[in-house]
């Protein structure tokens, strides 16, 4: 009897000893799960959140690189408007004329640089910047000029002082005209035509003939019958000829 009782105790002891490693293993797993699940997030969720945060950071960094000019937004941007438009024409600057209105053919405009980058460049303003009727003369770095498409090439625009003094250049305009784009050649032709009508033109007939010869090259590919093929200064020369004939008849 005693021997049987001894065997039972031995069996229970062995069973308990066998159960302890399994219990210890379960306890360790529970502790590990407790660590992973802390804060109601699993390990996989935490890793996903980290990956998303890093991705968002990279996107914001890339976006900032594309949008922000290197030199920041301090200072001002100065522009000069020059176009052969009606003296009463108006060009609103910014949304709903927020930065004023240009009236007439030319004007100098200065706006804060941060505003130039933000909302100054409306669709209309962008058009005049693109056609070089509105030119930036100060306030942007070379990098910023490239970003906004304002890194001017030779002949794309005239310095304000040159533009304002065109009518006083006389025949010296021949030194400037060959270097200009078609748009600017057309503007000069319009400016000279207006001066002729106002009897303030100081350019000689010989000069006008040479200007017209160069102007014809700009329109040589136009369809036959297009009046522009005669040249941008043809009307002035024709008017001068008519004036001479009228004088001869007197």
Image (spheres, helix red, strand yellow):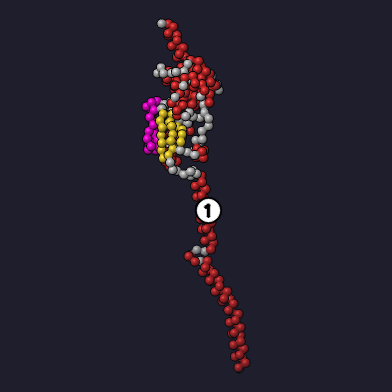
The residue closer to the viewer here, 174 or 33, is 174
**Label 1: how many Cα within 10 Å (few below 14, some 14–19, many 20+):** few
Quarter placement of the C terminus: top left
Asked whether residue 92 is drawn in magenta, I would say yes
223 shown above or below 127: above
The residue closer to the viewer here, 28 or 2, is 28
Provide the secondary structure element on which disc 1 rests: helix
Asked whether residue 90 is drawn in magenta, I would say yes
Residue numbers of the magenta segment: 86-104
Find residue 231 and report its horizontal and vertical position in percent: 50, 19
Could you tell me if residue 231 is visible in this image?
no
Residue at the spot 49% in from the left edge and 39% down from the top edge? 141
Residue at the spot 43% in from the left edge and 18% down from the top edge? 201
Find residue 246 and report its horizontal and vertical position in percent: 42, 9
Query: Which residue has dot 1 on it?
Result: 55
Could you tell me if residue 58 is visible in this image?
yes
Find residue 234 and report its horizontal and vertical position in percent: 48, 17
Residue farthest toward the bottom in the current orientation of the protein: 1
Residue at the spot 43% in from the left edge and 11% down from the top edge? 243
Residue at the spot 60% in from the left edge and 93% down from the top edge? 2
């Amino acid at each position: 009897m005693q021997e049987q009782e001894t065997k039972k105790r031995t069996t229970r002891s062995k069973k308990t000893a066998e159960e302890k490693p399994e219990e210890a293993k379960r306890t360790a797993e529970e502790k590990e799960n407790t660590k992973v699940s802390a804060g109601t997030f699993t390990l996989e969720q935490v890793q996903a959140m980290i990956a998303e945060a890093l991705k968002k950071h990279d996107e914001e960094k890339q976006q900032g690189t594309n949008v922000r000019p290197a030199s920041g937004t301090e200072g001002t941007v100065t522009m000069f408007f020059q176009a052969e438009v009606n003296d009463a024409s108006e060009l609103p600057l910014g949304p709903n004329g927020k930065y004023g209105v240009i009236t007439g053919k030319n004007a100098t405009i200065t706006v804060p640089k941060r505003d130039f980058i933000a909302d100054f460049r409306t669709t209309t303003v962008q058009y005049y910047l693109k056609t070089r009727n509105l030119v930036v003369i100060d306030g942007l770095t070379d990098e910023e000029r490239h970003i906004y498409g304002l890194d001017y090439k030779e002949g794309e625009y005239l310095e304000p002082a040159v533009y304002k003094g065109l009518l006083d250049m006389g025949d010296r305009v021949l030194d400037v005209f060959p270097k200009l784009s078609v748009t600017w050649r057309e503007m000069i032709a319009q400016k000279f035509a207006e001066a002729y009508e106002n009897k303030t033109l100081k350019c000689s007939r010989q000069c006008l003939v040479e200007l017209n010869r160069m102007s014809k090259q700009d329109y040589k590919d136009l369809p036959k019958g297009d009046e522009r093929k005669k040249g941008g200064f043809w009307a002035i020369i024709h008017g001068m000829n008519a004036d001479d004939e009228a004088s001869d008849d007197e």
